[in-house]
Amino acid sequence: MKSAAEAEIYRRLKLVDAGWSFALHSLNLPEHGWKRVSEIDFVVAGRRGVYVIEVKGGYVGCANGVWTYRDRTGTERRRRESPFAQATGAMFTLQRRLEDRLGRETMRDIPIGFAVVCPDCRLPEQTSVEWDEETLIDRRQLDRTDGLQRSLGRMADYWRAKPGGRRAVLEEPLLREVLQALRPDFDAVPTLRQIVTDAEADLVALTASQYRTLDYVGDNPRLLVEGGAGTGKTMLAAEVSRRSAASGKRTLFTCRSQVVAGFVRHQPGMQDVHVVPFANLAAGSEGTFDTVVVDEAQDLINFADLSYLDSRLAGGLADGSWYMLLDSNNQRGLVGSCDDEALEYLRSLRPTQVRLQDNCRNTRQIVTSTQQMTGADTGVSSAGEGPAVVVVEEPDRSRRAAAAAAELDRLHDNGIPNTDIILLSPLTLADSLFADLPARWRHRIDVLDLHTLRKPARGRIAFARVEDFKGLESRFILLADIGPVDPGRIRNLYVGMTRARVGLWMAAGGQEQRQEDDR
């Protein structure tokens, strides 16, 4: 996905059913009337027509005929052309393409239109001379569980009712022709980059089940969500926070990790949420919160930390509104502490309890390998297919380092950017296997912090300790130094392996592998 806003709309489109047959993302139109290349964010089609969906994430505003777009990093762009003008141009280009491929007579009565979607903001309610309200879908509509479904129906009714409008119903045979015209079937030998892209598309689609969980528990004041790594807990925690803040509640999102908190703080729609690492709460603003959301809650479920949260929540833990998301079995004890009695106390407060089963991060290969090597329950294997997990069993450290360098060379040769790769170890960089990489790779390594996470430097590779990368993920992971010297070995192995979305490479010496077999 090109942006977080498009990813959100993609997830929501997966939940749209009645009346809509398919949605296509990022359709390239090389014959655009004004630009050499145009890219439609989405095309949705069903019995009521074919429609262009233009997505604008972040802040969107207009003053004196100039449109301002501000993304989640704070970068602003100003354009004379409005998103509605963009969508109009793309709509006419799409219409011409379909007429050229299917015939003008075939498409003569088929409804074609557009809508602009602004998932992160609300445009002025009054109708502009440039657009009608039926062609705008913003935060007001999307805050409803069925908001996108309703808005698409309203959009279709608008275009079908226009004077001289097209009102034909697209039956299934013609819908198939439209799909084939827009995305012709073709055979090709996939490169590693294409395998990665296909795998991630499957994984994004799976997050729709997490949104159904959100809708199911939306009216419950207290929620305890348990799920393994990759089941979408941080995504859910952020969305719960957004919805709480959007309803006017003073909302706190907290977790143990400084890096995760910083990353979540800069996600779209979080500007009204107080995102504070737990260690910084005492030094922050005074007063209580209407809602407290805790991610990676297994790091904070002990009586000392719960007592502090109780003091910051209106109504306390017993009567207040809180949402805690945790992996109580596999990630506990790596950072902070999780007390069984404290967990039972939370359960005694009668929260709604939800178990997440769908792994929406890892490919099937990574899920299977993690289960085999750690015995952990990582949820139901995802449908995504990716490269095989590679485990290098080599007792000699220098040879393991050479193997790691060879893997980095292979990824580079296959077109994988360095910014899509994370080096992980339970040790510091200086003590890790990656300190022994050849100079051509060693000199490109940056230790991960919030700055390198948000804006990775081109050509650089990030390194992180396993415990510092909890709650985060990367397309490719190289994991090393999981050995008998580390008493938390299985926990480190579990967390490290499940950070990889698509590709996982691990280095294990002979002793480490024997211990795994003995376990």
Image (cartoon, helix red, strand yellow):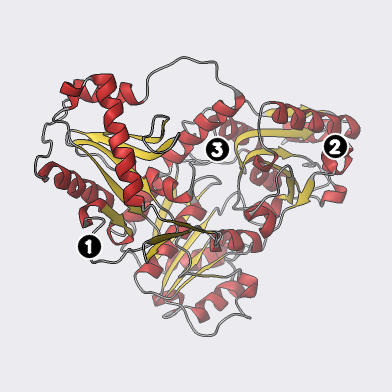
Residue at 34 percent across and 26 percent down: it is 182
- Residue 440 numbered tag: 2
In the rendered image, the vertical position of residue 95 relative to residue 297, given as above or below: above
**Residue 501's quadrant in the figure?**
top right
Q: How many marks?
A: 3
Depth-wise, is mark 1 or mark 2 nearer the camera?
1
Q: How far, Cα to Cα, is label 1 from label 2?
A: 58 Å
**Residue 127's quadrant in the figure?**
bottom left
Tell me the residue that label 1 is attached to: 127
Give percent across and percent down for residue 149: 24, 47
- Residue 362 numbered tag: 3
- Of the residues shown, which amino acid type is indicated by label 2? Arg
- Of the residues shown, which amino acid type is indicated by label 1? Thr
Tag 2, which secondary structure? Answer: helix
- Outermost bottom residue: 286
Mark 1, Cα crowd under 10 Å, few <14 / some 14-19 / many 20+, is few
Q: How far, Cα to Cα, is label 3 from label 2?
A: 30 Å
Depth-wise, is mark 3 or mark 2 nearer the camera?
2
Give percent across and percent down for residue 315: 41, 80
Of callouts 3 and 1, the N-terminal one: 1
Of callouts 3 and 2, the N-terminal one: 3
Tag 3, which secondary structure? Answer: loop
- Of the residues shown, which amino acid type is indicated by label 3? Asn
